[in-house]
Amino acid sequence: MISLEEINEPAPTGDLEQVAQRAAQCAPDQPIAIYEVHLPSWMRVPEEGNRSLTFFEIAPKLAEHAKLLHFTHIQLHAPDYVDPKGLHFLVEYLQQRDLGVILETASLASVASGPHEILADGHCANDETHMFDYHYKWDTAWADETCGYFATDPLYRKFRQTQFTHRDVYAFDASYLLPLSEHLVTRPRSSLYGLMPGDSWQKLANLRLLFAYMYLLPGKKLVFMGDEFGQQNPWQPETSLDWHLVSETSPHGKLMKWVACLNQFYHDEPALHQTDADAAGFQWLDTSDAAASVVSFARKSQAGEILLVVLNCTPVPRYNYRVGAPKAGFWSEVLNSDAMEYGGSGQGNLGGVEAAPFGWNYQSHSLMLTLPPLGAVALKAPGQ
């Protein structure tokens, strides 16, 4: 941990091994999950005139939160006036806890300049050595279409089923980032929670489903602060996030646990990040069931590991729902957004399903699944 005194000392010459390690963490075949933070409004001190936290105060709190949720990077939006020492301290603090730092503008990067690798303007770059430069394009079209779909009443989602396949035209032309960003997807400004239809339970179930869809699709991830726990009020730069909603047993706390689970799962499963820019790593299984608003797809790792994903985008559970599978054997249910620990109703497939020798969706076998309401399930192929 760096001290306040250390930031007054001349910067060291740089650790090339550390720079190379950070470069590897930004490679296209690595998991990248970004937490987007507006520093003045992330957390405030209401008992002291609602002031913002200083850079020195926010550093340990922000690092702890990001690590708890298993984010790999933090994108920082700073106030108009930036204390160079404070910003440098914050960047150092986050980096020393293996969190990549993305600064919103090149001018901020110059304020926090130092020997360490800093991410700026949506790509990885090193101010000292320029040893690497991995660019990620923001897929704003996906963000707008996806949020438009999830904002639609489930009764009418069957008329928008084709939105799931619009990405196919360009999805593997470059390395893309899927941005659930305040600036891009909340027009007019609203929280993601506010965009979701239905009562409170359905709003949170829709959010779990939306996050599952994003994390299980090809592409790096970005989540705007507050959305990870279902911030209810529209974001305002002059006020703090609704941290009072979060507790271990509250529905919003359970949503945050789901996001942490997704980040960890995304990190642990090679099929979800190794082949982001490779069409061979993704396959739609079925997007034709508009009547039930169900879609299914498969993700594949470089070694051939397979995950099968099914999304039920209505509040109606689907029982004995057949989905094609490319392998025989027992498919383990490894992810379920409707689990009770995440605030769901607890419906699922009791640990997994044995594939039947009955071809479906142009696959050699098929699975008979229970699809939970407004839920996503992921199953891992046998022998993995």
Image (cartoon, rainbow, N blue to C red):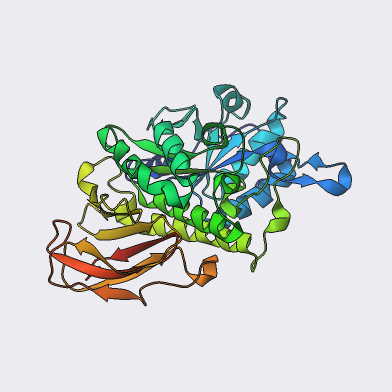
Residue 219 x %, y %? 36, 42
Compared with 268, 241 (above or below) is above
Between 141 and 158, the residue placed more toward the observer is 158
Residue under the point 58% across and 63% down: 254
Residue 248 x %, y %? 64, 67
Residue under the point 68% across and 51% down: 61
Residue 196 x %, y %? 54, 48
Residue under the point 44% across and 43% down: 149
Q: Quadrant of the C terminus?
A: bottom left
Residue 274 x %, y %? 30, 48
Q: Residue furthest bottom?
A: 350
Between 67 and 56, the residue placed more toward the observer is 67
Residue 183 visible in the current orientation: yes
In this rendering, position of residue 315 left or right of residue 232: left
Compared with 97, 23 (above or below) is above
Residue 18 visible in the current orientation: no
In this rendering, position of residue 80 left or right of residue 168: right
In this rendering, position of residue 336 left or right of residue 364: right
Between 292 and 37, the residue placed more toward the observer is 292
